[in-house]
Image (cartoon, rainbow, N blue to C red):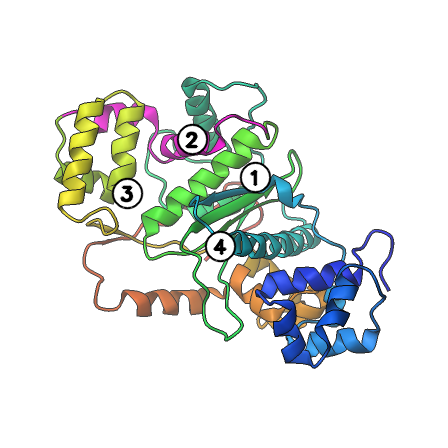
Amino acid sequence: MPTALEASPGERLRTLRDLLGLTGSDLARMTGISQSWISQVETNAREPSEDRLRVIAEATDTPLSFFFAKPSSVPLDSLRFRKMASASRTLTRRISAFYGESFRVTEEVTSDARYPAPPLPYAMANELTEEDIEDLADQTRVALRLAPDKPIPHLTRALERAGVAVAPIVLSDPAGDTASTNKHFGVSYWAGIGETALIGYFPGHQGDRDRFTLAHELGHLVLHTFRPRAADPEGEANRFAGALLLPRSRAEIDITDRMTLEGYARLKANWGMSIQALILRGAAVGNIGDSRKRSLYVQISQRGWRKNEPVTVGQESPLLLWTLITKLFGTKPYVPASERLAIQPAVLRSIAPQPVAAATAAAGADHGSRTNVVQFKRRGSAGPDEPANVLAH
């Protein structure tokens, strides 16, 4: 039975429903257990029997240990989301539950493997100037062991080697189909110095969008972990992302007021940023004015590039969590890890996908459209102070 440090089974039951996107009636139909019993347990109006929890566990392919697991240390009201304003509250609640469970698992496996916490810089001042954000982005490049003025070949791997875990979030609906999350892009949390950091993102069809999401969420970790009440956190994180992906020293050289969209397309191939993000970056460093920016955006709309830009940036795949769980649970880790980590195998497959399976899926999605794909090279060997080749290929 749970200890004082663990959530009640009722709380965990509600978390399970949120995690799987199930209503009380959905779960009642799946299990044959009345909806009123489910509701009473979730509100702690009655104690659940282990037999009924076992029925729910079997019906949802969830280990019984899930109901007695210590809850995530993430305060869900502190999560930072990159999402559209019209994103569904119900879906956002589900993503919060999914992220909370992902964070709990990440804490456990990184602790068991003694993987180092990220050495990220962090902002403390109440107000940040644009120069402050630029400087913090430069400091973050140093922390990630990146060149100060070169493109980032593989942002995901740079984050993971520095101790920031990255997890793709793929949700399914009750019918087993992939649920739409196209109004959400990313979510992140870091408790601070010496603590676990996890960036969750929703894989899309555009590698440049995913890279910007990771950089944006990293911005939240650096800028808002100790400044939770910043006036414009999303704007600051966007500025940080641009500065991280294309440092000011290069943006001031590479972007000019006379550059055509074709020139921006060439920059996209080099820096792994969308044309639209590059235009905003040029404006942020003062190299293009408002009228030129508006003109470029009109041209983008006229060419139909708002949602479908030319030049495909190769998609990145995370590796850290898969590497750690295979070290702990073997080469076929999902089932044996499920009971120990108190998590559904399907959730574990989402946040720690098998690299070969992920590569095969990506190859299938890109079949017939490989022309002009920008594949960023992997970083070289880990330095002497990095974990002993835990991410070696």
Q: Which residues are magenta?
A: 229-257
What residue type is disc 4 on?
A: Ala
In depth, the one of 304 and 209 nearer the eye is: 304
In x, y percent, where is residue 388? 57, 49
Per the model, the C-alpha gap separating discs 1 and 3 is 34 Å
Q: Which residue is mark 1?
A: 385
Which amino acid, mark 3? Ser
Figure quadrant of the N terminus: bottom right
According to the picture, the residue beneath numbered tag 4 turns out to be 392
**Which of these two is toward me, 385 or 37?**
37
Instruction: Please tell me in which quadrant of the rendered image residue 129 appears.
Output: top left
Residue 59, percent from left and from top: 66, 78
Q: Which residue is mark 3?
A: 274
Q: Quick one: label 4 or label 3, which is nearer the N terminus?
A: 3
Q: Secondary structure at mark 3?
A: loop
Magenta region includes residue 269: no
On the picture, is 188 further left or further right than 8?
left
Give the Cα distance between marks 4 and 3.
29 Å
Q: Secondary structure at mark 1?
A: loop
Residue 56 drawn above or below residue 18: below
Q: Earlier in the sequence, mark 1 or mark 3?
A: 3
Nearest to viewer (mark 2 / mark 4):
2
Check if mark 1's residue and mark 4's residue have beta carbons within 8 Å: no
Mark-to-mark CA distance, 1 and 4: 14 Å
* SS label for mark 2: helix
- Is 384 left or right of 236, judged from the image as shown? right
Of labels 3 and 2, earlier in sequence is: 2
Label number found at residue 235 = 2
**Badge 1 amino acid:** Asp
Residue 20 visible in this rendered orientation of the protein: yes
Mark 2 or mark 4: whose residue is earlier in sequence: 2
Q: Quadrant of the C terminus?
A: bottom left
